Image: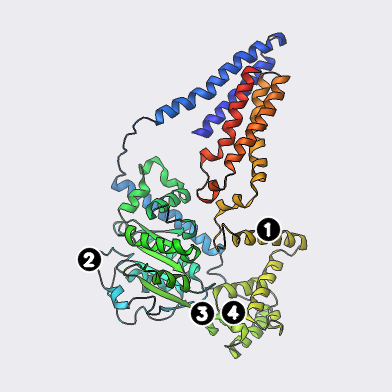
Amino acid sequence: MVLGWVGLVLLFVAGVIGYVLWGGPSGDRPNRAQVSGTLLAAVVIVPPVVVWAWSRRSPLVPAAPSVAQTAAAAQALADRQVAAWRRQVQVRGIRLPAPVKVRWRWADPQVAVPRDEVGATSSGGVSGPGPVRGLQVGELLGSGVVTRLHNEVYGRLPRGRLVLIGGPGAGKTAAMILLLLQALEHREHLAPEERAKVPVPVWLTLGSWNPAEQGLREWAAATIARDHPYLRAAEYGPDVIGALFDTGQVALFLDGLDEMPGAHRVRAIHRLQTEAGGLRVVLTSRPAEYQATLDDGAQLPATAVLELRPVAVGAAADYLLADCTEPVRRAWVVVTDEIRARPDGVLARTLNTPLTLSLARAAHPVDPTPLLDPALDTEQALRRHLLDQTLITAYPDPREREHATYWLGWIAHHMNTPPTGPTRDLPWWHIPNWIPSWQRRLVFGPGAGLVFGFIFGLIAGPGSGLVFGLVVGLVAGIVGGQEVSAPRTFVVHRPSHRELQSVLRVGIFFGIFLGIFL
């Protein structure tokens, strides 16, 4: 609504400028400018005052969405996500050239409760994504491709609580993506009457949540509304996202518990304990960070904890050889033979995660024999080589590579510098705070102030009115820029429309003032 009003004002301004300059004899231009300025002031000032007064009245409580509206919204959410996550699987190369066969097992007793306790059906349990069968000893304990997590684990947990832990690059995020997509596809193939009973999994990145300031539902609902704006359509009724939570028709797939600060991790688990009742929850974390939350007394009840294991030597070799032409395959055979011959060697210990295996394929699409260089005699040296070579492959032009390296280094520096870092998560709304405040003021403030100072100064005439409009608009813009550049705007909260429009307000009203009186 605000943008529409600004657009109408700008159209009116254009008409006023035309009327003042060409609407009659040049001798009457000052009179036309004064009358037009007064009208323009009324057009700009009166509507916001009316809207503000209207917003202060006691609002009517809207009716909750109907059962049919909530079901339709859930189906729309599922349909959109199936298409989106299928694209993500393709873009991320999770299934091509072949899925990495990641092993998983029931986690150590220090972080996981016994299997039979998790499998016991509770009176407060929620229905799973399909028929829930009783767990038998050994059913969950084993190894296999991560796509089996749905049928063998997630679909059999009465309460649907699952934590995936694993080291760096172990494939936690990829595993949860495949699990989420499998849950969506499973729901897609159910009969309509059964489909309504199955919750729709929704992906949420925990690095964007500050549980000290936001409750689970408040944060999750705001994030879903941001990522899925179509759910705000009138056809679904008011607050259909809240209705999806109330009826248990969403499942929360929470990625990156280890990306949160330590104090936030404990608070997040406590909020999940108290605020996620009736919801299925899947969580990923590195082992040490998850263990730390348990040591602080934060634990999700009735939760299965699975540990992703290093990729087996044979599975790693199969992945590296998959979908290769004969000349490339012969080169990779030399590398895979080394991996098989020395399972405890540096090469085998390094190429044992989905991340390093995919980097190896991307870094050496034609000739992988440089991986056998004797100089790469440590895991750290080999990983550094993979990263460097991936950049060289992605940016063959040295100038482009230098440019990309500079900005990647700039991002990495700020991610590891207080107060934002050290962090492995990159919330995009933190980036403006990395820019010095004087640079933000220089960009945001004077630009807006000059634009509106010029427009409204021009109405007063091409003489002193224009000059004073530009000068005062510039000053007002700098003052407004100081407000919008405050660190709290970007670090604690995402910038709101009101915060981003502060500069425009200052420039507009100073411009109006000068257009009328100068």
Tell me which label, 2 or 3, sits earlier in the chain.
2
Percent position of residue 236, x then y: 36, 44
Q: Is residue 65 left or right of residue 465?
A: left
Q: Which mark is residue 123?
A: 2
Q: Is residue 372 above or below residue 301?
A: below
Residue type, label 3: Pro
SS category of the residue bearing label 1: helix
Task: Tell me how the rendering is colored.
Answer: rainbow
Percent position of residue 93, x then y: 56, 67
SS category of the residue bearing label 4: loop
The residue at which mark 1 appears reads as 407
The residue at which mark 3 appears reads as 310
Q: CA distance from mark 4 to mark 1?
A: 28 Å
Q: Which mark is residue 54?
A: none
Tell me which label, 3 or 1, sits earlier in the chain.
3
Q: Is residue 64 above or below residue 368?
A: above
Residue at the left extreme, as displayed: 123
Tell me which label, 3 or 4, sits earlier in the chain.
3
User: Quadrant of residue 504 in the image?
Assistant: top right
